[in-house]
Image (spheres, helix red, strand yellow):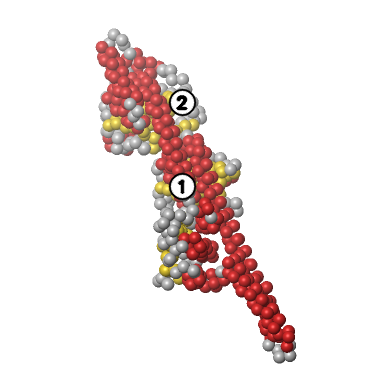
């Protein structure tokens, strides 16, 4: 709502005539007081004071200037009006005197008829209310309790628009003549200081946003999980725009939605990672999915299905879409327990969301890359298992049958000269069987599929050319990819210890701790192992990281080699168990 022409009407002109008399010493003294008050406010702004300090100073200086027992500065938003009606909200941003506890900073009230604030916005100039009209108005109870008998309000115009209001009240019968004009003059000049303070705050907000983006970029660069990045983004959004709660919702391709992060007021019925269900058809989630645009709910009392948010203490909210790679990925919603969020909330949140979308996209792409690598590893392992089964159940079984027939023929007394040749063929067939068994063991160890990681590692230790001191504190089965990954790490490191490290002993420790399989293989060999010189070590690292794990090597020359791995495991009922070592 644009501010109308603020030229004085007849009432204000009369006040101005009484207040502006250059030959009157009182007028000169008041002018000096006004200038001194404005200088103090301007000094605060120049010193980089926060807007809250500036607003409080304006309320304080105004109270002393017109000798009011109570003053406050309010920001107005969502202004609209037809045929002289004013609709919107006023939020106290600075207060002084006897209303400080009744209209503390953050107090928010809908503008209603009968308020001096509403009258000032309607006319575009100062307005006063006194006597019975004040006592019977929207603040009648507070007015009577504090013994206030008259109130005045003057609009604050910034960049041609109503920004807010100054309000003053007194316990005297009424303010003296000229008070409205003095209040309007001071407010008009104070608006410049308010605008400057707002500009300074916007610069601070920009710097704060850049700092937030750097923090998020650092998380992504460190390889933090998508869940950690989503939580950090949601926390930053709540810190910037609200004090109620914040949610990040991801839209799924099947038409459902998932709650991926939540900050602020707790709700035991909401679980991060769970489907986001039961949201209002006219609420933020459904509207943003349908339109792809930022939207708001100013009062959940007016929304069917809004009761779930009201139970949380959230009465209003604003949501903005998150676009990733040109498609609607999800949304961020900020909930408020103090009434509608400011008019510019959608714009500010959209700007922030557009900036953090890169962090969300990077985290999402990393998660998809890890999942893709894990699928490739799983497919490779399944192919190994299938080849091993085919060799065992197909060619190997046929060769065994042929060997038995040849052996039977060789043992027949009627085959004189052929017996020796048949025996040689049978020995050759058995040799081929042994080779096939060795090949299939390398492709995929059958004992791992049949008996699990603990037995498979013990078998590796028994076959090792280097003595092995093994402590495996794992009972039961683990997820297949985890077992295969751990097995190949131990197998490769035992092979390296025998072929290259000239080690005399290898120590293998395996345990489950905090939902992670922790594996450490160390030898007392010559050290100096370099993953860049061997594809085997690089392959191990890739395999472990593809499963979401960690792989590290420490191999100083002459001091042996230590390889440590951590693999996340899904701990389920009866799925795995930490037990005593072998």
Check if mark 2's residue and mark 1's residue have beta carbons within 8 Å: no
501, above or below 305, in the image? below
In terms of depth relative to the viewer, which is nearer, 367 or 259?
367
Kindly identify the residue that appears in the image at 42 percent across and 38 percent down: 211
Nearer to us: label 2 or label 1: 1
Crowd band around label 2 with a 10 angstrom C-alpha radius: few (<14), some (14–19), many (20+): few
- Can the viewer see residue 125 in this picture? yes
Left or right of 68 in this view: 285: right
Question: Which residue is rendered at x = 33% and y = 13% of the image?
Answer: 20
Residue 144 appears anywhere in the view: no
Front-lying residue, 358 or 541 = 541
Q: Percent position (x, y) of residue 458?
A: 48, 71
Quarter of the rendering occupied by the C terminus:
bottom left
Residue shown at the point (48%, 72%) measured from the top left: 462
Kind of element beneath mark 2: strand
Residue sticking out furthest to the bottom: 413
Q: Position of residue 6 (x, y in %)?
A: 43, 20
Q: Quadrant of residue 68?
A: top left
Q: Residue at x 35, y 31 (%)?
A: 50
| Residue that label 1 marks | 222
Residue 24, located in which quarter of the rendered image? top left
Q: In front here: 135 or 252? A: 252
In terms of depth relative to the viewer, which is nearer, 12 or 79?
79
* Farthest-out residue, top: 23
Q: Give the distance between the C-alpha atoms of the residues marked 2 and 1, in whole angstroms.
A: 46 Å
Residue 319, x across and y down, in percent: 50, 42
Farthest residue toward the front? Answer: 417
The residue that label 2 is drawn on is 161
């Amino acid at each position: 709502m644009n501010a109308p022409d603020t030229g004085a009407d007849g009432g204000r002109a009369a006040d101005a005539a009484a207040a502006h008399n250059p030959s009157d010493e009182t007028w000169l003294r008041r002018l000096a007081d006004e200038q001194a008050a404005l200088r103090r406010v301007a000094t605060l702004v120049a010193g980089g004071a926060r807007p809250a300090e500036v607003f409080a100073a304006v309320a304080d200086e105004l109270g002393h200037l017109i000798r009011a027992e109570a003053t406050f500065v309010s920001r107005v938003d969502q202004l609209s009006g037809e045929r002289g009606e004013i609709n919107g909200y006023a939020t106290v941003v600075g207060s002084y005197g006897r209303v400080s506890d009744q209209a503390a900073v953050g107090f928010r009230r809908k503008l209603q008829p009968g308020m001096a604030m509403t009258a000032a916005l309607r006319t575009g100039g100062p307005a006063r209310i006194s006597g019975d009209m004040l006592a019977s108005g929207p603040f009648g109870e507070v007015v009577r309790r504090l013994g206030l008998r008259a109130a005045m309000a003057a609009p604050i115009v910034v960049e041609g628009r109503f920004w807010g209001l100054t309000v003053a009240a007194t316990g005297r019968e009424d303010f003296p003549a000229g008070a409205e004009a003095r209040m309007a003059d001071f407010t008009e000049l104070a608006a410049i200081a308010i605008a400057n303070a707002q500009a300074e705050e916007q610069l601070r907000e920009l710097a704060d946003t850049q700092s937030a983006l750097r923090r998020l970029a650092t998380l992504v660069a460190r390889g933090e999980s998508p869940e950690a990045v989503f939580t950090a983004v949601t926390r930053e959004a709540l810190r910037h725009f609200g004090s109620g709660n914040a949610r990040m919702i991801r839209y799924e391709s099947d038409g459902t939605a998932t709650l991926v992060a939540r900050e602020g007021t707790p709700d035991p019925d909401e679980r991060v990672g769970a489907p986001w269900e039961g949201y209002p058809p006219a609420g933020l989630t459904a509207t943003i999915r349908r339109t792809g645009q930022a939207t708001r709910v100013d009062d959940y009392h007016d929304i069917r299905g809004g009761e779930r948010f009201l139970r949380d203490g959230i009465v209003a909210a604003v949501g903005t879409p998150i676009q990733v790679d040109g498609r609607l990925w999800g949304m961020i919603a900020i909930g408020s327990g103090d009434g509608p969020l400011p008019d510019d909330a959608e714009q500010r949140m959209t700007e922030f969301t557009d900036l953090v979308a890169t962090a969300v996209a990077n985290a999402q792409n990393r998660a998809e890359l890890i999942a893709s690598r894990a699928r490739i590893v799983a497919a490779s392992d399944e192919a190994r298992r299938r080849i091993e089964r085919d060799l065992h159940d197909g060619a190997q079984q046929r060769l065994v049958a042929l060997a038995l027939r040849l052996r039977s023929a060789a043992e027949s007394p009627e085959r004189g000269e052929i017996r020796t040749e048949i025996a040689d063929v049978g020995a050759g067939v058995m040799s081929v069987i042994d080779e096939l068994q060795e090949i299939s063991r390398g492709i995929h160890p059958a004992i791992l599929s049949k008996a699990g990681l603990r037995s498979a590692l013990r078998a590796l230790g028994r076959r090792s050319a280097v003595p092995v001191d093994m402590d495996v504190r794992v009972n039961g089965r683990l997820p297949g990819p985890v077992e295969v990954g751990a097995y190949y790490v131990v197998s490769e490191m035992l092979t390296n210890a025998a072929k290259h490290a000239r080690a005399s002993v290898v120590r293998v420790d395996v345990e489950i701790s905090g939902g992670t399989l922790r594996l450490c293989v160390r030898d007392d060999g010559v050290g100096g192992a370099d993953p860049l010189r061997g594809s085997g070590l690089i392959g191990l690292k890739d395999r472990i990281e593809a499963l979401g794990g960690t792989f590290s090597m420490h191999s100083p020359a002459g001091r042996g080699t230590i390889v440590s791995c951590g693999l996340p495991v899904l701990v389920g009922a009866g799925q795995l168990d930490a037990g005593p070592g072998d």
